[in-house]
Structures are given as structure tokens and as C-alpha cells.
């Protein structure tokens, strides 16, 4: 959009009238010069406006609540003319911006590319957007001003804040992905080494190829691993939370749930999720859905009413055998807060009674 100063139209009209009806060539020359200058300034802003481009380096970024993140973008001037003064502002919705870094004033030479970055802080959980970028510049004489919007928005997903929490997984089933020092969970699908035969070794453990090669018996050794599918359920029924601080306690419940999902991913375990909340999501334990679950935790909200069922019993038939169910609600939040207030550095699922029944 090109904004024209009010006096420019007046000058153009007067100059045209004087040029047409004046008999003095000097006066006609002055008015024609004024009209030509106005035309050049207009053509300048039209040309530069079409060739001034914003390039953003992100489509979707994720950060935890109360976490900082750097946002970057480029301003490219593809025109043949310089931009003497260019104001650039990147919209950031409710995100906190340090030192107003999203407001920039710069100059651009012909075909120059400038990179800018600023730091944001997530202060509330949710799905937010950065952009559009607003560009404002004028011709060298300030007769015309261009306000242009670059509609390349970026999505910022603010997840629940990171909190310390250790997840306890034992017992489990053999042939999993988590390594432990317990021969009870020997995984015959993951060979570790070959050793000489010892009295009492089972015949099915003998490595016949190696034994034939060296003309004596050798026995296979296997890695000790186990697998514990994890299912995290969070109760967001508003009626189960204290009235005066239900929102705060509900946010803390989401933080605990996010910590459980993240820990399960660190152990490379199948993780599922369910909630008594908006849209009532349910995901069976599976690989590679950690980000999806955390994105749900970023946008889910509390619902009215009370939860009148036991999640462990309700989903018992839908979960794989050996699944460890963790139920997070107001009672678990109260226990976690008590441990945190006491200065406990090693808060585990057992210390806050977070471990559900193992099926």
C-alpha cells in the first residue's frame, strides 16, 4: 500500500494547472520539474516495493514455557536503488521480546541482503504465531510512503515448562531397548559376545559355527535389555482441582506429564497418552510420537466436571501387556510441589506416588 502525503496531490494539481495555462516558459519549466520529480518518486517506491523481500528461516519451532529462543529473518533488496531508511517490525503476538529486537530501522544498498535476529521468551503455553513482517519505507524526498506486509508467518509451539523428574520403569519384559545389568532380562535377539563353554551352559546357547572353527565349544552371551511401554494419563477435570488455583495446578499437571513423556523418549520406549481434557485424546504406546504428544500438551485445556472413572481400569484392555501407566492429577501435583518445596533434587515417580498399576 502506497500512502501519499496530502500536499503532494495539491502540488500536482496546481503544477498541472499552471503548466497548462501559464505563458511563461520559466514557470512552465518549474512546474514540469515538480511533476517529473513526483513521478520519479512514485516510480521509485513502486519499483522498490515489488523487490523488497522478507525471508524467514523457520516454519514451526518448539520451545518450553519460560524458555528463550532466537528468531532470525533476512531482508533482501533486489532492486537497483538503495533504501535510505527502512522500518521493519515482526509481529510476535503475546511472546515476550527482549530489548524490542523485533523493531528494526536499517538502510539497504542495491541488491543487499541483511540478516536480523531477536530473542523471544515463552510466557504461556499454547500455539502462537510470529508474523507477518511489516515493512515501511519512503522515497528520498518523503513524498510517498510504502507499508508492506510479508505474509510468511512462523508457528511457535510453547510446550509445558521443563521440570526435574526421574521415571522408574521396572519391572519390564525382555527383548526391549533399555539396557540393564540384570540377567533375568537377557535378550536373545541382541548378541553381545562369545566365550568359552562352561559347565552348565545350555546347549541352545552354543555358537556352533565358532565352535567348529576353533575345534572347541563356545557359548553365546547376550545383552540384558527390557521393554516397558509407557502410558501417561493426565486428569484435567476442573471439578477435581481446587477452585482458587485450579489453573496453576492444572498447568503443573501438564508439566509433570510432559516430563514423563520426555523421559520415556530418552529411554527409547514406546509411549502413549490419554487425557480427561479438551478433545479427550487417546494414543496407544508407539514409537516416534513424542513430539505429537508434547504438541497436544501444548494446546490441551481443562474441561468442566469431575473424572468419575479409574483410567488404569478404563484403558486396561486397550494397552499392551506390561504397560506402565502413570496417572497425573491434583494429588500428584500436591505431592510434587511438597517435594520441590522441601528442596528434593531427585524427584522420582515413586516418591510422588505417580506410578500406576502395571498390567
Image (tube, grey):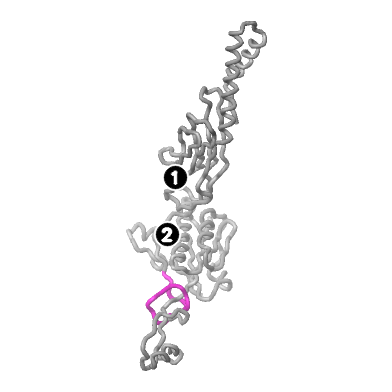
Residue 313 position, x and y percent, is: 55, 71
Q: Earlier in the sequence, mark 2 or mark 1?
A: 1
Query: Which quarter shows the N terminus?
Result: top right
Q: Tell which of 177 and 307 is nearer to you.
A: 177
Q: Which mark is residue 334?
A: 2
Return the residue found at the far left: 343
**Which residue position holds label 1?**
120
Distance in Å between CA atoms under marks 2 and 1? 31 Å
Q: Position of residue 43 (x, y in %)?
A: 59, 27
At a point 43% along the width and 76% down the height, the residue shown is 225
Front tag of 2 and 1? 1
Q: Quadrant of residue 13?
A: top right
Q: Label 2, secondary structure: give it.
A: helix
Question: Callout 1 environment at 10 Å: few (<14), some (14 to 19), or many (20+)?
Answer: many
Residue 140 can be seen in this image:
yes
Q: Which residue corresponds to the image point at 61% horizontal and 8% vertical from the top-left?
A: 25
Q: Is residue 239 magenta?
A: no
Question: Residue 346 at what x, y percent from top left?
Answer: 35, 63
**Residues in magenta, as a range:** 168-185
- Vertical arrangement, residue 46 with respect to residue 351, above or below: above
In terms of depth relative to the viewer, which is nearer, 28 or 162?
28
Give the residue at the far top of this rendering.
23
Q: Quadrant of residue 51?
A: top right
115 over 267 or under it: above or below: above
Q: Is residue 189 above or below residue 164?
A: below
Q: Secondary structure at mark 1?
A: strand
Please check the rendered image and state whether residue 175 is part of the magenta-colored stretch, yes or no.
yes
Q: Which residue is at 33% across, 61% downward?
A: 345
Residue 236, given in percent of the width and then of the height, sits at 52, 58
Classify mark 2: residues with Cα within 10 Å, few (<14), some (14-19) or many (20+): some
x 46%, y 32%: residue: 107
Amino acid at each position: 500500500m502506497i500512502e501519499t502525503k496530502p500536499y503532494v496531490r495539491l502540488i500536482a494539481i496546481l503544477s498541472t494547472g499552471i503548466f497548462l495555462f501559464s505563458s511563461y516558459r520559466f514557470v512552465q519549466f518549474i512546474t514540469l520539474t515538480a511533476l517529473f520529480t513526483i513521478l520519479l518518486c512514485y516510480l521509485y517506491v513502486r519499483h522498490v516495493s515489488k523487490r523488497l523481500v522478507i525471508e524467514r528461516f523457520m516454519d514451526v519451532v518448539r520451545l518450553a514455557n519460560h524458555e528463550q529462543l532466537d528468531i532470525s529473518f533476512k531482508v533482501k533488496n533486489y532492486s537497483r536503488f538503495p533504501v535510505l531508511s527502512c522500518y521493519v517490525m515482526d509481529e510476535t503476538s503475546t511472546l515476550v521480546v527482549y530489548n524490542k529486537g523485533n523493531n528494526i530501522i536499517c538502510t539497504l544498498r542495491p541488491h543487499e541482503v541483511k540478516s536480523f535476529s531477536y530473542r523471544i521468551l515463552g510466557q504461556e503455553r499454547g500455539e502462537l504465531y510470529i508474523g507477518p513482517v511489516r515493512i515501511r519505507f519512503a522515497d528520498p524526498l518523503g513524498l510517498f510512503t510504502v507499508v508492506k506486509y510479508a505474509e510468511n508467518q512462523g508457528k511457535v509451539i510453547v510446550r509445558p515448562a521443563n521440570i526435574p523428574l526421574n521415571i522408574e520403569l521396572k519391572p519390564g519384559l525382555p527383548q526391549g531397548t533399555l539396557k540393564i545389568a540384570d540377567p533375568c532380562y537377557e535378550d536373545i535377539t541382541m548378541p553381545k559376545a562369545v566365550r568359552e563353554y562352561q559347565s552348565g551352559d545350555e546347549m541352545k546357547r552354543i555358537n556352533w559355527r565358532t565352535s567348529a572353527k576353533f575345534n572347541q565349544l563356545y557359548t553365546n552371551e547376550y545383552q540384558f535389555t527390557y521393554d516397558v511401554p509407557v502410558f501417561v494419563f493426565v486428569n484435567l477435570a476442573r471439578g477435581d482441582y481446587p477452585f482458587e488455583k485450579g489453573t496453576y495446578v492444572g498447568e503443573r499437571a501438564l508439566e509433570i506429564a510432559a516430563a514423563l513423556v520426555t523421559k520415556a523418549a530418552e529411554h527409547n520406549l514406546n509411549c502413549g497418552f490419554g487425557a480427561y481434557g479438551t478433545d479427550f485424546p487417546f494414543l496407544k504406546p508407539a514409537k516416534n510420537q513424542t513430539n505429537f504428544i508434547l504438541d497436544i500438551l501444548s494446546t490441551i485445556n481443562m474441561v468442566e466436571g469431575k473424572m468419575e472413572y479409574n483410567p488404569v481400569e478404563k484403558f486396561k484392555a486397550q494397552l499392551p501387556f506390561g504397560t506402565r501407566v502413570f496417572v497425573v492429577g491434583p494429588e500428584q501435583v500436591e505431592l510434587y510441589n511438597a517435594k520441590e518445596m522441601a528442596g528434593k533434587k531427585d524427584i522420582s515417580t515413586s516418591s510422588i506416588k505417580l506410578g500406576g498399576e502395571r498390567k
